[in-house]
Amino acid sequence: MSPDRRRFLGWGAAAAAGVALAPALRLIELAQARSPEEAASALQRWGLLIDTAKCTDCEVCVTACHEENGVTGHGRPATDAQWIRKVSLRDRRTGYAQTLPLMCQHCEHPPCVDVCPTGASFRRADGIVLVDKHTCIGCRYCVMACPYGARSFIHEDVSGQKPDVPRGKGTVESCTLCVHRVDRGETPACVTACNRDGGKAMVFGDLNDSGAEIYRRLRSQPSTQVRADLALNTGVRYQGL
Amino acid sequence: MARTHYREIDGRSGGFYALLAGLGALIAAGLGAAWYMEHYGHYVTGMSNRIVWGTPHVFAVFLIVAASGALNVASIASVFGRSLYKPLARLSGLLALTLLAGGLAVLVLDLGRPDRLIVAMTHYNFKSIFAWNIFLYTGFFAVVALYLWTMFEHRAGGHSKPAGMVAFLWRLVLTTGTGSIFGFLVAREPYNSALLAPLFIIMSFSFGLAVFVLVLMAACRGSGRALGDALLARLGRLLGVFVASVLYFVVVYHLTNLYIARQHEVEWFILVGGGVYTALFWIGQILIGSIVPLVLLFAPALSGSHRAIAAAAICVIAGGMAQVYVLIIGGQAYPQLVFPDKEVASSFFDGVVAAYAPSLPEVALGVGGVALALALTAVALKVLPFLPQSLADGDVEPVKA
């Protein structure tokens, strides 16, 4: 074999390998979470889709959330924090009963963010609504403003905090959509638990990603927002409500 | 009219020191309550995740609303040129400052993190009405202090009218801001009304004047000053007009809601089936806060009686506290409408009227704020000439027909 021919074959093999591998590498890149240095991007809008027909009487989403985020109670229901709760509904006229999980709805126009005097309540570029624990002064105006009763004021000392989830007495908190997991490319704890041990009623994903299941289902099936009349464009959507 | 002579109160009697000692004890109790709440957390209060604003906020909002209203007597003199009220203008400005200080102290000490007050002063979200209010409150102190200076300083006497005009406009904006804290809450049916801003303004007229009348009567009595019948009768009639105006706004507010089908349930809650809130509305706000004072102030048999005017002012304050309580706490106790047309139940008290009872620390903090306002007033009256030597009818301008 002449050296020229050998070189040609070598280059050819490399090119073929490159062509074959490039999409795979690209897929890995897409699947990988962004690096911690990279800012959240408005190209994404994280959200949840909850199918109430599949939501059973279980509370695995609630348990998983509170375990993941270190939210423990003191046996005082009126003042203990709840990031997610199961709500039982019964239609006043027809008597039709159903149950669903309710948490921060991660609005595009969050009233909690509007009213916060210090800007501690904020909406990340990718749609996740959070509280900056360093600038929250504990005025509770956001609790007054939230249409979903999704926020809790921390009424006493907290213990057993998780490294990813800072909490503190005298500040307000709510569902973070497990932002620490989302930033690692994982799904929120409630969704993981529901799909593993519950009714598989919850889907998490990017509302802007045409390849995502949540995008396809919202596009092809009916869904509703809670208090849609307020025009807040929630990131959490419900089916069967 | 003879030139008005102002003089400090003597402030050396046993009664004065007893007053200061009593107020000091209440202030200390308030501070102790604040420390207790911050140390253990708010679970030691009656507040919860459903009633996040409790009794301290009732006191704070009342004091802040009354503060802006207390300035009205000065405004009537400077801005509207009624010289009868001019000798009262300094006390009016003083009460505006001290009541606001008392109210803000309560508000700040109830924060979950009062140690982070500096954060509130350095981080602003200008879409938040609370953030506007931080500027409106601090600005009010500056504007009223300047206004008072123009009253005290002869060389600045000519500037009293423009300063009074700025202070008057500022206080209208300030009370609009206080009312809008509630008025702009879209997701709570008992609030969410532009009517709350003008309602708060007229409430401030009424509450502020009631406090002013009582402090004026107490200061004159305590310092042995004459207080003319005609002057007091004039203040009493003005108070009556304000009380009637508040009642008018309250009636319009509820009639509007009664006309709107989706507001029927919240109206039923306040007017009929809300238990303690319904009782406070009818007995506290309407009977004691509106009807009784109107009778005391306008019944011909009582006309101008000092006791009737004092009793009316006390009723206005009691009814005003009931009104703010029904608004703030009743408004939160009423369940939020998250799922219209559904019966709702959860472990987080969805769909039920939230339970609340004022706790001792909350009441102590609120009363401490009132005591702070009164103590600051008493000390100021002693160190600076806020009060005329005499307010007898012959010493102030005769009342025009």
Image (cartoon, rainbow, N blue to C red):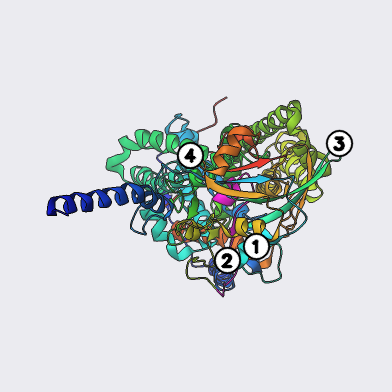
For the question of whether residue B280 can be seen, the reply is yes
For the question of whether residue B234 can be seen, the reply is no
Q: CA distance from mark 2 to mark 3?
A: 38 Å
Q: Disc 4 is attached to a residue of which chain?
A: A
Tell me the kind of residue under disc 1.
Answer: Val
- Between B39 and A64, the one nearer to me in the picture: A64
Q: Find numbered disc 3 in the image and state the secondary structure of the residue it sits on.
A: loop
Q: Find numbered disc 2 in the image and state the secondary structure of the residue it sits on.
A: helix
Q: Find numbered disc 1 in the image and state the secondary structure of the residue it sits on.
A: helix
Q: Position of residue B59 (x, y in %)?
A: 60, 54
Q: Quadrant of the C terminus of chain B?
A: top right
Q: Disc 3 is attached to a residue of which chain?
A: A
As drawn, the label of residue B363 is 1
Q: Position of residue A154 (x, y in %)?
A: 58, 64
Q: Disc 2 is attached to a residue of which chain?
A: A
Question: Which residue of the protein is positioned furthest toward the front in this rendering?
Answer: A1
Q: Nearer the viewer, mark 4 or mark 1?
A: 4
> Is the same chain shared between marks 4 and 3?
yes
Label 2 crowd bin: few (<14), some (14–19), many (20+), radius 10 Å: some
Is B391 left, or right, of A41 in this rendering? right
A147 inside magenta stretch: yes
**Disc 2 target residue:** A68
Cβ–Cβ below 8 Å for labels 1 and 2?
A: no
**Disc 3 target residue:** A94
Q: CA distance from mark 4 to mark 3?
A: 36 Å
Q: Nearer the viewer, mark 1 or mark 2?
A: 2
Residue at 48% across / 45% down in the picture?
A127
- Between B49 and B161, the one nearer to me in the picture: B49
Q: CA distance from mark 1 to mark 2?
A: 38 Å
Is A6 left, or right, of B353 in this rendering? left
> Magenta stretch?
A142-160
**Disc 4 target residue:** A208
